[in-house]
Amino acid sequence: MSYTDDDTEIEASRAPLLEHLVELRYRLVVSIAALFAGFLLCFYFSDRIYMFLLHPFQVGAELLAAQKASGGKHGPFDLLLALTGLKEVPHAPGGQGLKFVFTAPLEFFFTKVKLAAFGSVAITFPVLAWQLYRFVAPGLYKRERRAFLPFLVASPALFLMGAALVYFVMLPFVLWFSLSQQIIGPDVSVELLPKVSDYLSLVTTLLLAFGLCFQLPVVLSLLGMAGIVDSKMLSSGRRYAIVGVFVVAAIVTPPDPISQISLALPLCLLYEVSIWCVKLIELRRKREDEASSQDVATIP
């Protein structure tokens, strides 16, 4: 399709300001209704969702108790295998269950409200993204709409990859390290008694940090489509990007090297993927420009 056809299509989709406002109101109503329905659903299952988030901590506590009972036969990698279902969780004889506390009468209630709000945004993101796309699509060229759709799929997929890395790698090692700092003796005991709100804040912070950092290919690809960056620029700045990745990983992760490396290494890999994505965008743009120039040359 030539640029003239694209311009004709844009002109055909023009609408008065009032129609745009009506369309915006409709999209907002659908988005708010989806968020409200998702909030009610997540709040109804908030106890189960919270127990799901507690699973890495629970498995870590049981493995640590089994390690002490068996004289150090279980390590942190056993925790990862237990979370993925590849290893049965050992139960130490006389082990105590996981104990969380809340220090205000309504603390756990508001924790469940925050959890429901976070879960509502997560599960309704496809609806929100689709409503945003449907609102801006009439103002895009046809080829821009085709290019925009893959990002609606890649963005949540990358966010889920980051969340999975947090759940199966980051949380196990962070919680293993936290539990191993306890001092339990006959006279003095220094035990970890986490608050329900603090644990949720830790989990949501890590999920958001990893999920947003994993959007690196999407952001760089969009910048490449806009002509702000190119593959040569990204390749030449690889060294500085790696340094920046490790700095970001040191800021958004807990202060232990395992957590920082767990975020930095995937981000370095995603940076390389971003370079190839920008290269593909440049090749496609070059082919389109050549086809457009040939069309212009054939016009008498």
Image (cartoon, grey):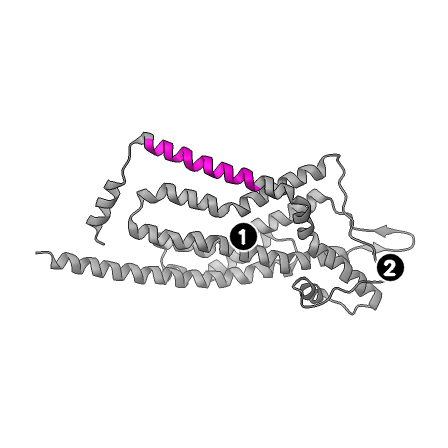
Residue 28, picture quadrant: top left
Residue 178, picture quadrant: bottom right
Cβ–Cβ under 8 Å for marks 2 and 1: no
Q: Mark 1 points at which residue?
A: 211
Q: Which residue lies furthest to the top in this view?
A: 18
Say which of 169 and 9 sits in front: 9
Q: Position of residue 87 (x, y in %)?
A: 70, 68
Residue at (60% x, 51% y) in the render: 206
Task: Tell me the tag on residue 267.
Answer: none
Question: Is residue 59 at least partly visible in the picture?
Answer: yes
Residue at (38% x, 43% y) in the render: 134
In-image side of 226 versus 240 (left or right): left
Q: Name the residue under label 2.
A: 94
Dominant SS of magenta comes to: helix
Q: Where is residue 195 in the image (x, y as percent from the top left)?
A: 73, 44
Neighbour class for label 1 at 10 Å: few (<14), some, many (≥20)?
Answer: many
Neighbour class for label 2 at 10 Å: few (<14), some, many (≥20)?
Answer: few
Task: Pick the quarter of the image with the N terminus.
Answer: bottom left
Who comes first in sequence, dot 2 or dot 1? 2
Check disc 2 and report its element: helix, strand or loop.
loop
**Mark pair 2, 1: CA separation:** 39 Å
Q: Magenta span has 112?
A: no
